[in-house]
Image: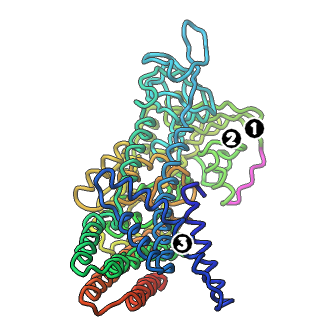
Amino acid sequence: MHKQDIPMLLSGILLVSHWLIGFFIPTQNTSILLAIGASIALVPIARKAYGALRFKMASIELLVTIAVTGALLLGEFSEAAIVSFLFLFGAFLESRTIRKTRSAIEALLKLAPQTAIRIRDGIQEEVSIEDLIEGDIVVIKAGNRIPVDGEITHGSATVDQAQITGEPLGVDKTIGESVYASTILVDGYLEVKTQRIGETTVFGNIVKRLEEAQDKKAQTERTIEKFAAWYTPSVVVLSIITFLISRDINLALTLLVIACPGAMVISIPVAIVTGIGTLAKFGILVKGGESIEKMASVRILAFDKTGTLTQGKPQVTQIIEQEADTRQILEFASIAEQGSSHALGKAILTKATHEKILVSDKADSLDVMAGLGIIAHGSFGRIAVGNHRMAMLNPQEFPSDQLEAYHQLTQIHPTCVYVSHNGTLLGYLIIEDTLRPDSKDALLALHKQPIQQIHVITGDSMQSAKRILDGLSIDTIHAEILPQEKAEIIVNLKKHGKVAMIGDGINDTLALSESDAGIALSSDASEIAMKTADVVILGEDVRKVESALRIARFTNKILKQNIFISIGTVFFLIFGVLIGKIHMDVGMLVHEASVLAVILNALRIMRVK
């Protein structure tokens, strides 16, 4: 609870106290509680109205201030208290959303390294990132984050680039290849020539553009404020004219109170809160009404592949036999990978466990070759498990024709490791990400919605992406894409309609922000993605994307109906007051009826399945 929310809390407590006392002690007069509650709530509203007037703006706060003041002067304390409290409650929902989204940037900035180990004249020294210049050589050891964008000048390693590329497998890097700031060196050793630092890195660019996107979202005007731009001065002028003609101050004040859109004030929050609650029952969390309206207008979907449509975890999907059968290949590979913390090693051990293969032998020594593979020695002899680059270094095991065959295999299956025993090639293990079991049904259900196009964006090669996504209802696949390119794709898609981006990682945050509606899956999703997105889907069921869009569309429909009911009621009451057919008591009754109508209408959202 922030300081600016205290008036809302106090007025709410007084309002509830009035109702409770009236229920248990009907004879007790508690009008003073309503008057105090309305006065407390009126202070921040009047302050905002005054601030807007200084810039020659007639805001809805001005109308509420005049109406609540008028209601207090006429002794309509209940109307004054309810209208003022509900107005503050709507503002509270909006400010709470903005505070949460801005915390995402702070968490993202904490991931960036603040120092680096620089080599200069053969001496290593720890320096601040700001002290680095282009061309400096920095050292990165296993377990550390890479501090700069640059080119490897010495060493080889496996780098976890998930927060940049979004792909679950570590990438083998060696001399001449590029690395990105804030990615993690899993194993090995690198010396990197600095090319970009700070905001100019790929990671820095994500943060910078994310800040811009958040600022843009925070400036979105509420529908009620647009309505007030012409409605507020019109009602005030109408009341003045009414007084000048009738010379009846009570009639003028009655018109002001009657014209205050009480149902309008509650019509939007009640529909939003009901929609949020209904979505929450399905395990779908949204930031507020703006997020619901965004989802309701979506016509184009863009999915990040990894961790969204796929499991996001490497698995051994195929074993290609050469000089041994499947069980032998897995058994020898498991001996070498026993106790491995590498993602590929874990995938191999998991597959062996699934196949109920018990590893009886244990290596006496292990030679871990960063970015290449592993060689185990023991009573069993020599076992090698490695990638194509490691095979190229062992011509005695891989003659040219066999090496070429291996190369062709990697074109189809990028993550393909070989297993050899005492120089004999036993076979290959294909390790890939796999589809979620519900992905196919989810996309089929989405096509039944008014969705025009479904796109998939991935850092994988096109060939690999097509193989994994085969059979899904997808219009376009965008392959070999980096985070900033994801955002550019979203921007281009927005030219053809409202776009929702569905992702789960840090690498998706920029695209989530650029989209009209960002949707994050929270199973293993980064906290940044969850806070940046407009919508967070709990669990791994991608079918909830369809549920989120369907409920959002119905909620938006109810929202528009409520606005129509509330505005229609106000104009009806104004007309009735002006022709002398409606007085304060009848007007208050109609007001309460309209409030009840918008509440009952909003409750229809809860029936959506």
Report, in whole angstroms, how far the alpha carbon at label 1 lies from the one at label 2: 7 Å
Q: Which sits in the foreground, 388 or 11? A: 11
Left or right side of 107 for 331? right
N-terminal of the two: label 1 or label 2?
A: 2
| Cβ–Cβ under 8 Å for marks 1 and 2 | yes
Can residue 422 be seen by looking at this rendering? yes
N-terminal of the two: label 1 or label 3?
A: 3
Q: Is residue 21 above or below residue 264?
A: below
| Cβ–Cβ under 8 Å for marks 2 and 3 | no
Give residue 409's quadrant in the image. top left
Q: Where residue 208 sits in the image (x, y, percent)?
A: 41, 38
- Choose mark 2 or mark 3, whichever is in front: 3
Residue 220 belongs to magenta span: no
Name the amino acid, label 1. Ala
Magenta extent: 355-361
Residue that mark 1 sits on:
363
Q: Is residue 82 above or below residue 379?
A: below
Q: Determine which of the numbered discs, if any, sits on residue 280 in the image.
A: 3
Secondary structure under tag 2 reads helix
Q: Is residue 81 above or below residue 388?
A: below
Secondary structure under tag 3 reads helix
Q: Where residue 28 sits in the image (x, y, percent)?
A: 65, 87
Residue that mark 2 sits on:
336
